[in-house]
């Protein structure tokens, strides 16, 4: 494994981050009346056009900085532990550093999901200074194709820059399924991530029509091989993927709307990126009472859900509070959704 420079400084930053994360886990176990994680969208526009993605456009303007700050303050008031900036492409937002800096004024762990195209050495250092804790990039293939340009060939230099300069934790997510031409690309991506000192996860992705099919034999073999490379701290919360890979439903208690919430660019609270429209309440009006209600609400889309972060956050409470409220949310045709 490549030795990363400034290891003493990075180890100190990582140790402080782990202390904050342990405090977050302790608080989540002690009380169920606050969100553990929220995704917030400051920028719907994206510089790429991946065929399977339904989370971007080419015209939206950045959400104003003061608006995003107010939303972060509201999330902090709800007791949210982790806020992850997503999109679209968040690096397109002109005030991204200030958004992250404002998150860190609260006891919030700051994360970001990006396609990585806009990363430079200077940009990474600015993210360090702003206080970013976690960054994730999903890489879909080794060489760009008509499905996705998020390829290792294009992004490898960006990964090297992250290895050299990033003080924050970096996770590289490879994918199988959903039109990816060569499933073995995911294994190449995962091994490269580990070589550079990052963590690596694997996801199952939907196709261009938003549908997910069981993996074929070759895809499953690659998927299972990558799972053996994941660190236990990550893979132990991804066991639900095994059923997804075989086209089987999962029996679990989805806590979306409670422990996990998704805030769109319009400031509405949704269950997740793939169930926008439920409950669609303005964040300003979302209260602890809403959190408690949704904690006990059974989600009709849950058996075939593949949203990794929702599964992982919900796992904190898998052992308690059986859900007794039936959601008014309809089950859409071809409801299967993407993994992040």
Image (cartoon, helix red, strand yellow):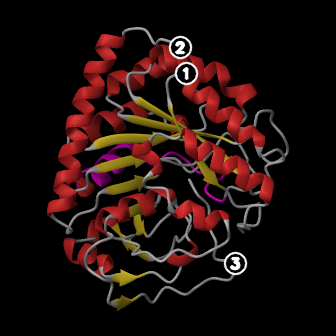
| Up/down of 5 relative to 106, above or below | above
Residue positioned 67% across, 27% down in the render:
155
Give the SS element for disc 2.
Answer: loop
Residue placed under numbered mark 1 in the picture:
196
Choose the circle earlier in sequence order: 1 or 2.
Answer: 2
Q: Which residue is mark 3?
A: 334
Residue 191 screen position, x and y as percent: 63, 30
The x and y percentages for residue 296 are 30, 81
Label 3: which secondary element:
loop
Q: CA distance from mark 1 to mark 3?
A: 38 Å
Residue 38 occupies quadrant: bottom left
Locate residue 118: give its quadrant. top right
Tell me whether the residue at label 1 lies in contact with that at label 3, contact meaning CB atoms closer than 8 angstroms: no
State which region is magenta: 54-73
Whether residue 214 is visible to the viewer of this picture, yes or no, is yes
Disc 1 to disc 2: CB gap under 8 Å: yes
Mark 1 and mark 2: span between their CA atoms?
6 Å
Label disc, if present, on residue 2 of the rendered structure: 2
Occupied quadrant, residue 270: bottom left
Q: Is residue 18 magenta?
A: no
Residue at the extreme left of the image, as rendered: 30
Toward the top, the furthest residue is 5
What x and y, as percent, mark residue 136? 51, 39
The alpha-carbon separation of the residues under discs 3 and 2 comes to: 44 Å
Disc 3 residue crowd, few under 14, some 14–19, many 20+, Cα 10 Å: few
Describe the element under mark 1 as helix, strand or loop. loop
Q: Earlier in the sequence, mark 3 or mark 2?
A: 2
């Amino acid at each position: 494994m490549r030795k990363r420079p400034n290891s003493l400084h990075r180890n100190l930053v990582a140790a402080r981050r782990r202390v904050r994360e342990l405090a977050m886990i302790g608080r989540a176990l002690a009380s169920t009346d606050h969100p553990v994680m929220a995704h917030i969208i400051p920028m719907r526009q994206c510089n790429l056009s991946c065929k399977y993605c339904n989370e971007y456009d080419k015209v939206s303007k950045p959400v104003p900085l003061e608006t995003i700050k107010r939303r972060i303050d509201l999330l902090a008031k709800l007791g949210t532990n982790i806020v992850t900036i997503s999109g679209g492409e968040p690096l397109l937002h002109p005030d991204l550093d200030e958004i992250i800096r404002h998150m860190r004024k609260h006891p919030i762990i700051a994360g970001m999901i990006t396609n990585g195209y806009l990363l430079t050495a200077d940009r990474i250092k600015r993210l360090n200074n702003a206080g970013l804790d976690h960054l994730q990039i999903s890489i879909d293939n080794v060489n760009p194709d008509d499905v996705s340009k998020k390829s290792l060939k294009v992004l490898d230099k960006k990964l090297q820059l992250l290895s050299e300069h990033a003080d924050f934790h970096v996770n590289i997510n490879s994918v199988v399924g959903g039109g990816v031409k060569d499933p073995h690309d995911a294994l190449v991506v995962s091994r490269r991530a580990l070589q550079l000192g990052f963590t690596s996860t694997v996801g199952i992705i939907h196709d261009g029509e938003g549908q997910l099919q069981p993996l074929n034999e070759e895809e499953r073999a690659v998927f299972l091989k990558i799972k053996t490379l994941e660190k236990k701290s990550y893979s132990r919360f991804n066991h639900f993927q095994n059923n997804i890979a075989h086209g089987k439903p999962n029996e679990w208690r989805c806590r979306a709307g409670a422990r996990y919430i998704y805030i769109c660019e319009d400031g509405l609270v949704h269950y997740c990126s793939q169930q926008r429209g439920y409950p669609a309440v303005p964040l300003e009006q979302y209260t602890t009472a809403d959190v408690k209600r949704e904690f006990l609400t059974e989600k009709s889309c849950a058996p075939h859900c593949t949203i990794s972060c929702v599964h992982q956050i919900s796992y904190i409470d898998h052992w308690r509070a059986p859900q007794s409220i039936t959601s008014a949310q309809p089950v859409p045709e071809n409801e299967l959704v993407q993994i992040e």
